[in-house]
Image (spheres, helix red, strand yellow):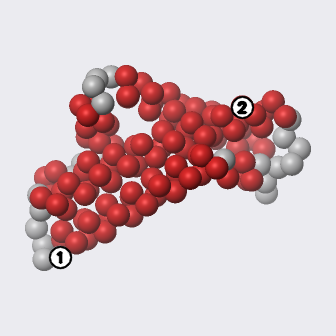
Amino acid sequence: MLPGGRWLVAALAAFVIAVAVTMIFTGAARTFLGDLVDGVPRRVRAVAAVLGAYGNLARAVVFGAVGVLLFAEAALHGDPVRTGGVNEALRGVAVAGRGVLPLLVVSAGLAAYGVYCLVDARYRRA
């Protein structure tokens, strides 16, 4: 590993974890609804609130898993082989979370976020 490489990977881990925390706040506080125009039908806004919140929380799990299970662990151990991508992070979630159920919950959340993005594309404040 390059000199200072451990610190660079640790900084990357901190950044990715900070993004995950921001997504948790965005999902819980539903701040993403401020991006929609005022004339969104009430039912569409309600569905967007649920899908967007669930989707942002699922995205936070993925980003957090990447930050903690890959980058932070690689920085701690000084082993660049321990880094990876979303696939390795989700595999770690499956192992830590007792099987496939956590992956199904996260996958459904990512699908919910995709549907929210369609609503967002239609009713986005310009």
Residue 47 appears at what percent x and percent y?
72, 31
Residue 64 appears at what percent x and percent y?
38, 49
Disc number placed over residue 73 in the picture, else none: none
Is residue 84 in sight in this rendering?
A: yes
Is residue 87 in sight in this rendering?
A: no
**Disc 1 secondary structure class:** loop
Give residue 121's quadrant in the image. Answer: top right
For the N terminus, the quadrant is: bottom left
Q: Residue at x 52, y 49 (%)?
A: 24
Other-residue count near label 2 (Cα within 10 Å), few / some / many at <14 / 14–19 / ≥20: some
Residue 61 appears at what percent x and percent y?
42, 43
Q: Amino acid at mark 2?
A: Val
Residue 126 appears at what percent x and percent y?
79, 57
Q: Earlier in the sequence, mark 1 or mark 2?
A: 1
Q: Amino acid at mark 1?
A: Gly
- Hey, which residue is sitting farthest right in the picture? 39
Q: Residue at x 37, y 28 (%)?
A: 103
Image side of residue 29 versus residue 104, left or right: right
Image side of residue 87 versus residue 125, left or right: left
**Disc 2 secondary structure class:** helix
Task: Give the residue at mark 1.
Answer: 4
Image side of residue 19 versus residue 12, left or right: right
Q: Residue at x 31, y 69 (%)?
A: 11
Task: Give the residue at mark 2.
Answer: 47
